[in-house]
Amino acid sequence: MRQAAGLVLAAARRRSAGRVPIIALSGVQGAGKSTLARALAEASLGAMAQFSLDDVYLGRRERADLAAGVHPLLATRGPPGTHDLALLDTTLRALLMAGPASVTPLPAFDKGRDDRLPESQWPCFPGQPEIVLVEGWCLGAQPQSPSDLADPVNGLEALEDRDGVWRGHVNAHLETDYAHIFSRFDAVLHLRAPDFSVTPLWRRQQEEARIGRPLSRNEDEALLRFISHFERISRHMLAGGRRAEVEVDLDASRRPLAVRSVDRDQF
């Protein structure tokens, strides 16, 4: 992982033209993004400000309004359209403008309460960062074509999004405001799972480690439903629908098999 961290750090610094570089880290749920973030912090040899796309989820009330006005599936956090990208943009700008005496609040979300923490409880980054890292499952994802949206990819879409309104709404956000945010990244590092089938196992392991016990049957069913919201874009990214300057191929045990660097400036 240190090799991948070094490659993406070099790519980001090359493209940032002297300002603080912004690196995005993507990969399916449970792929090990937090582990790689630690490796990047060690390789950066400088102060790194880090937060997650999860930290800028829309609050529960805002998602309830989307569910009532657009589609019920938007009540579930995670897919494009359920994040406060204005907050993400404001946070990035504040970090890039920070000086030695600055104190920059970093957003935080309480997944147990399914709501954003009040700003008084946000962590703060002291001083001027030398690198900014944003971690999130869909960072760098590219939108699909209308024809790709036609058929459901799982039972959730087949039963609860029969007319395609939800997936069309999500895809439209990928084409617009998410694409704008992604363009601000100087480099994207993608952890590539062997296929989507490992995601339920990885996510289950992650959740059981968090709560300290095996999931009950009802909890496992709820987890599988939750993962279904991410399946379409995850499969699309695994098939190549993503931007990434550096990619790490993982095996089913999350061990790195290969590291690839892609210089997009040559295209």
Image (cartoon, rainbow, N blue to C red):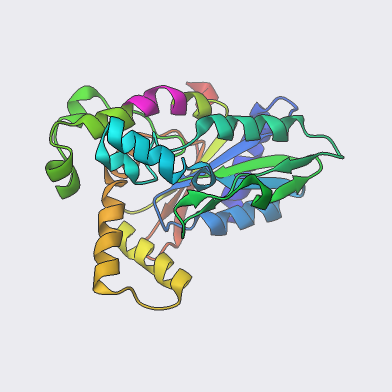
Indicate the quadrant where residue 145 lies: top left
Q: For the point 25% across and 69% down, which residue is it?
A: 218
Residue 21 is situated, as x and y percent measured from the top left of the image, at: 67, 34
Residue 176 shown in magenta: yes
- Above or below, comparing residue 213 to residue 20 in the picture: below
Question: Is residue 135 left or right of 146 when viewed as pictured?
Answer: right
Residue 215: x %, y % from top left: 33, 73
Q: Which contiguous range is marked in magenta? A: 172-178
Task: Say which residue appears at 17% left-offset and 42% top-offset.
Answer: 160
Q: Position of residue 213 (x, y in %)?
A: 40, 78
Q: Is residue 233 visible?
A: no
Residue lying at 12% horizontally and 44% vertically, measured from the top left: 159
**Residue 173: in magenta span:** yes
Quarter of the image where the N terminus is located = bottom right
Nearer-the-camera pick, 99 or 77? 77
Q: Which of 16 and 212 is in front in this view?
A: 212
From the viewer's perspective, is residue 113 above or below residue 27? below
> Horizontal and vertical percent for residue 76?
34, 46
